[in-house]
Image: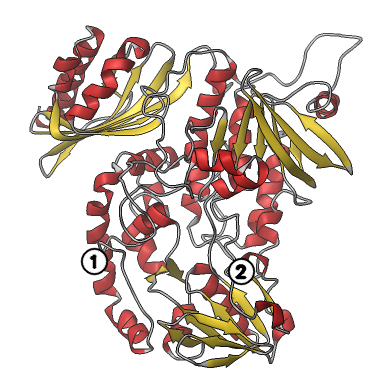
Amino acid sequence: MLDKAPNGKVSEILNALDAALSAGDVDRAVALFQTDCYWRDLVTFTWNIRTMEGKDQVRDMLKPQLSATKPSNWRIADGENASEADGITDSWIEFETHVARGFGHIRVRDGLIWTLLTSMSELKGHEEPLGTDRPMGAKHGVDRNRKTWKEEREAEAAELGYTRQPYCVIVGGGQGGIALAARLRQLDVPTIVIERNERAGDSWRKRYKSLCLHDPVWYDHLPYLPFPRNWPVFSPKDKIGDWLEMYTKVMELNYWSSTTCKTASYDDKAGEWTVVVERDGKEIVLRPKQLVLATGMSGKANVPKFEGMESFKGDQHHSSQHPGPDNYRGKKAVVIGSDNSAHDICAALWENGVDVTMVQRSSTHIVKSDSLMELGLAGLYSEQAVEAGMTTAKADMTFASIPYKILHQFQIPVYNAIRERDADFYKRLEKAGFMLDYGDDESGLFMKYLRRGSGYYIDVGASDLVADGSIRLKSGVDVKKLTANSVILSDGTELPADLVVYATGYGSMNGWAADLISKEVAAKVGKVWGLGSSTTKDPGPWEGEQRNMWKPTQQQALWFHGGNLHQSRHYSQYLSLQLKARKEGIATPVYGLQQVHHAG
């Protein structure tokens, strides 16, 4: 009986929650939650991505949303069992709403709900054709007018965007746009992906030649089609590029490469966009109902302006345009920046005989790849996790089940352990003059990424070159100006240079909205990315979720999608369901629409 006790505890509170919500008794439902509770909802209740913090916020959400949602059938998920540790009972759960089926997670403390995750799995009547519902493919029988699969695909390509309009246009054909388009394809939402590069995957191929994924393979699968079991742990950029190109073909995406999106505008009365693109030398006007900017949170280069840049006689470019080290052997390079790209580029330049100096203007969080893998990711994304029965979907949901408000509390012990394990490594870096940090609250890499998307390097070897002086370092300084042949720093140091690389990061994604739509729309939407944590480069107030990502924005029918491969995979599910619901005319009453506190 003891091993069934956790199931009984979870079932008891789920039954009570089911009864209260079915009766429309908001106060009775709220009474089932801890005072310091968190309810994270991915679309099911809010038609938004929203975390309610505390009982008052739970009550405020349920009052307008409960009658439309009509939740029912709360239960422990099929095949799952609750578990108990450190006074917390938790379980995977399932439930339904009036229009959808949901999956989630619950943590119970002292008999009350502490954290609740609810996510939309599928829309009733609009399920993906999976498993026993998969399409037949072959058409048995006889038909004089039969078309082959190839002919049908060719006809679709000839019609969509010309004689038949797409419901959705995705601007940006990198990993985010591709993952979302694949989901929409399975939901029968006519979609065109606009990509300016010649081939799918070129956004990876065209980066510096030493680029590899710093995240491990288990973290990086795309929807429906995981990497094979023999895929390398860290994928080289060209291999990822080829995978993305293959994926667009086998998932039958309408992918318009070598196509430039020139302008977009929204007609409130018609409820549609006018998107002007140039393809094959011709201007084409698309009129989708929904527009998604999947241009990448690392897509709009942030190029600084320094005095004298126009007089510099060598090569200078942003890290996103860096071709690699081949043409700079025997020359002198200055790399402005100290995050992932800066380290990668510096290391590749050093390996190819370039005298390279890194200019570190502000402190940087460094974590060794092995330590991150073993202490930070192994429980969810590793071969050991797979062998223990962990699936990608369950790993994603586990991570999603921890509210952002308290996520740092889970991360701090991890990075404390990493600091202890790699103490000698960090001492060597500091001795070389490198300015280290571990995040404003010592919570490490993931929180830095979620809050600001910058300020860190996952060390795969470059840090040793910095520590031993092979990569020269100037830290705690800024660039004063450039001359014809050098970079002059704020402390008066002059660095002779044939090459200057600006590894200075990227701007907010709403910069793409300013370029393609208007500055007014960009300001209306506001800053994209960040949590409002009031930490460095993530100004408050607290927002509780990623600003404007994967959810409705203040601009009708405009969406932002992207992030790393994990986020592109996971959140594409919820964005695709929001778009499908709108296409089918399902009511989508949005609760807690993103407020704008920062223009960009």
Closer to us: 369 or 31: 31
Kindly tell me whether residue 295 is visible in this rendering: no
The residue tagged 1 is 416
Residue at image mark 2: 319
Q: Position of residue 589 (x, y in %)?
A: 42, 18
Q: Nearer the viewer, residue 215 or 528?
A: 528
Name above or below for residue 146 compared with residue 41.
above
Percent coordinates x, y for residue 103 in the rendering:
36, 26
Q: Nearer the viewer, mark 2 or mark 1?
A: 2
Q: In the visual, does 186 lie left or right of 66? A: right
Up/down of 478 relative to 75, above or below: below
Tell me which corner region of the image, top left, top right, bottom left or bottom right, holds residue 29.
top left
Q: In which quadrant of the rendered image does the N terminus lie?
A: top left
Q: Which of disc 1 and disc 2 is earlier in sequence? A: 2
Report if residue 217 is visible in the image. Answer: yes
Task: Say above or below: 377 vs 361.
Answer: above
**Amino acid of disc 1:** Asn
Give the residue type that dot 2 points to: Ser
- Give the crowd class for mark 1: few <14, some 14-19, many >=20 residues within 10 Å: some
* Vertical relation: 339 (above or below) 178: below
Determine the residue located farthest toward the right in the rendered image. Answer: 144
Q: Which residue is depicted at the point 50% across and 93% down? A: 493
Say whether residue 40 is left or right of residue 237: left
Write down the quadrant of residue 576 in the picture.
top right
